[in-house]
Amino acid sequence: MATYAGIASAEESRSPHVAPLPPVSEQVANLVLGIIRYSRWPEPLQHVNICVVGNVMHADILLQATHFIGDVPVDSQVLSIEEALAQTSGCHLYYLGYLSGSYYQQLYDAVGNTAVITMEEENEHCSMGGMFCFTVANDKATFKINLDAVSRSTVKVHPSVLRLGQHRGGL
């Protein structure tokens, strides 16, 4: 809401101690890393590789540097859809932006019931097949859960994360 000549709106004056939200890319990175932190692959990972595929809007922070969960490094790389379909075993997590045509289904068919987490951005209904779906409204990133997709993966996600995603309107 706009303010004029230094006069704060009623909404701004009611909550003067509320810190502004971090940028959306930072919120998304925190959600992605938090989900990884509370997920268990069938074999413990010494390194987590995030593959970013498609036209993404909120993956900047993930792509900027190596992140760590405890001692485990988390790296992100951008792949074309063709590269992603050709090397499905090299990714522990797929972070998907907009893909054209039937590429979503092709990728989900390729990873099948493997130890992979799938995430989509800007999929409000979480209906394409990803396990986690991020949405942004009012500069706040949230996620939903597709329990059917989660149950097909061999990656185990902590029940608290599942409840949190359902509470936010997941499937």
Image: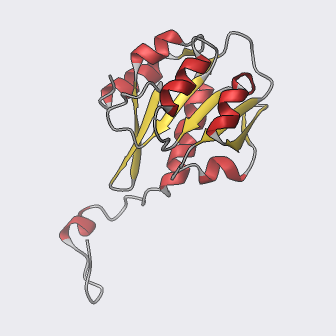
Image location (x, y in percent) of residue 51: 66, 36
Name the foreground residue: 117 vs 43.
117
- Would you identify the image quadrant in which residue 133 lies? top left
Image location (x, y in percent) of residue 168: 32, 32
In the rendered image of this protein, does residue 62 appear above or below residue 49?
below
Tell whether 157 sits left or right of 138.
right
Image location (x, y in percent) of residue 120: 48, 36
In the rendered image of this protein, does residue 127 appear above or below residue 28?
above
Residue at 59%, 10% in the rendered image: 154
In the rendered image of this protein, does residue 141 appear above or below residue 161?
below
Name the foreground residue: 103 vs 24.
103
Tell whether 17 sits left or right of 75.
left
- Would you identify the image quadrant in which residue 127 lies? top left
Residue extending farthest bottom: 5
Name the foreground residue: 120 vs 128.
128
Question: Which quarter of the image is occupied by the C terminus?
Answer: top left
Residue at 51%, 53% in the rendered image: 57
Total labels: the figure holds 0
Residue at 60%, 14% in the rendered image: 155
- Residue 65 visible in the shown view: yes
In the rendered image of this protein, does residue 101 appear above or below residue 11?
above
Image location (x, y in percent) of residue 99: 50, 41
- Would you identify the image quadrant in which residue 21 lies? bottom left
Tell whether 102 sits left or right of 14.
right
